């Protein structure tokens, strides 16, 4: 099963600012093709805390989980991550680097884990490219679609959680926590476009994407995740499609 988690934070950055609402996507897929997409979240939406808890919760059900992230997840991917977050570059270069890292990640981490019968929980996946490059940077969806079909034509998350928080909330949570990266230094309009793109993905794929109000207390968010994750576990053990849960 493949679970994806994306977090968007509104604002100019990740630390003090945020990117867009958060999408908690976890990649979870078994040999029978269950893919619970990556944990994705917006900066300041509490993704990291929730994703770590989600992984432990799934493992407590007796399921082996591979927890990974994008950009990153491989030695090559982590190098790309450092470049993309720190170095100015053309939008097409940025997008191609993201998908180059994703290709390596899919081929060397995600697919082998799924074929071994593990669930994969991935912090961000291709929804993030539609949101940040397609929406925030205004590249549009067509180029993203072409690259998606080339890099992972038959692989999609079974479930994606989007942790959503308003810009001012994300900024307050991230203020003074760390230095901002290149994305986090973007202005409010960038994060508004990114958030809108995430929400459009949710409207296009309601069977997969679940929006979670991350302004709620941690325990309230975990109650939502616990119930929805348990539905996936029951469906997986029963051999059902995740869309049926």
Image (cartoon, rainbow, N blue to C red):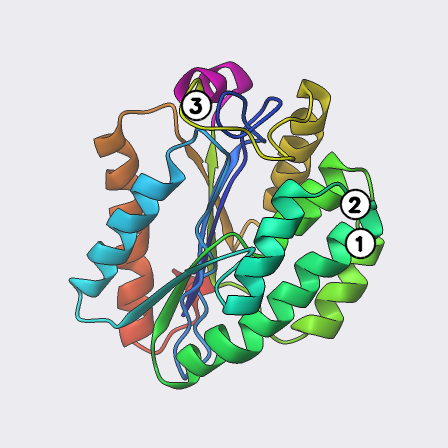
Check residue 99 for magenta coloring: no
Separation of marks 3 and 2 at Cα, in angstroms: 25 Å
Which of the marked residues, 3 or 2, is nearer the chain's N terminus? 2
Residue 100 image-quadrant placement: bottom right
- Residue 106 position (above or below residue 200): below
Query: Any mark on residue 174, and which?
Result: 3
Mark 3: secondary structure: helix
CA distance separating discs 1 and 3: 28 Å
**Residue drawn 39% across the image and 78% down it:** 30
The residue positioned 69% from the left and 21% from the top of the image is: 187
Q: Which residues are magenta?
A: 165-173
Residue 182 image offset from top left, x and y in percent: 65, 35
Considering the numbered disc 1 on the image, is that residue within a helix, a strand or a loop?
Answer: helix
Circle 3 residues within 10 Å: few <14, some 14–19, many ≥20: many
Label 2, secondary structure: give it: loop
Q: Residue at x 28, y 65 (%)?
A: 233
On the rendered structure, is 61 left or right of 130? left
Query: In the picture shown, does residue 146 fall above or below 201?
Result: below
Q: Which mark is residue 105?
A: none
Q: Choose the circle earlier in sequence order: 1 or 3.
A: 1
Question: Quadrant of the image for the N terminus?
Answer: bottom left
**For mark 2, what is the residue?**
89
Which SS type dominates the magenta stretch? helix
Position of residue 182 in the picture relative to residue 23 (left or right): right
Q: Quadrant of residue 71?
A: bottom right
Q: Which residue is mark 1?
A: 93
Residue 222 seen by the camera: yes
- Front residue (pair 64, 206): 64
């Amino acid at each position: 099963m493949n679970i994806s988690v994306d977090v968007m934070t509104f604002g100019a950055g990740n630390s003090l600012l945020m990117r867009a609402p958060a999408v908690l996507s976890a990649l979870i897929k078994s040999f029978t093709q269950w893919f619970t997409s990556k944990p994705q979240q917006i900066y300041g939406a509490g993704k990291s805390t929730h994703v770590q808890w989600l992984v432990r919760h799934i493992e407590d059900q007796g399921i082996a989980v591979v927890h990974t992230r994008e950009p990153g997840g491989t030695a090559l991917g982590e190098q790309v991550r450092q470049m993309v977050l720190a170095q100015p570059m053309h939008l097409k270069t940025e997008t191609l680097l993201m998908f180059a890292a994703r290709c390596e990640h899919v081929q060397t981490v995600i697919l082998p884990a799924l074929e071994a019968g593990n669930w994969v929980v991935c912090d961000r996946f291709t929804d993030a490219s539609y949101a940040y490059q397609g929406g925030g940077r205004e590249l549009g969806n067509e180029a993203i679609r072409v690259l998606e079909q080339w890099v992972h034509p038959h692989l999609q998350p079974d479930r994606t959680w989007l942790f959503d928080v308003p810009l001012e909330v994300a900024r307050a949570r991230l203020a003074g926590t760390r230095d901002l990266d290149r994305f986090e230094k973007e202005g409010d309009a960038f994060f508004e476009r990114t958030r809108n793109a995430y929400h459009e993905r949710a409207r296009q794929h309601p069977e997969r994407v679940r929006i979670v109000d991350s302004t709620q207390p941690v325990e309230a968010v975990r109650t939502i995740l616990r119930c929805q994750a348990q539905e996936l576990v029951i469906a997986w053990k029963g051999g059902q499609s995740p869309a049926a849960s």
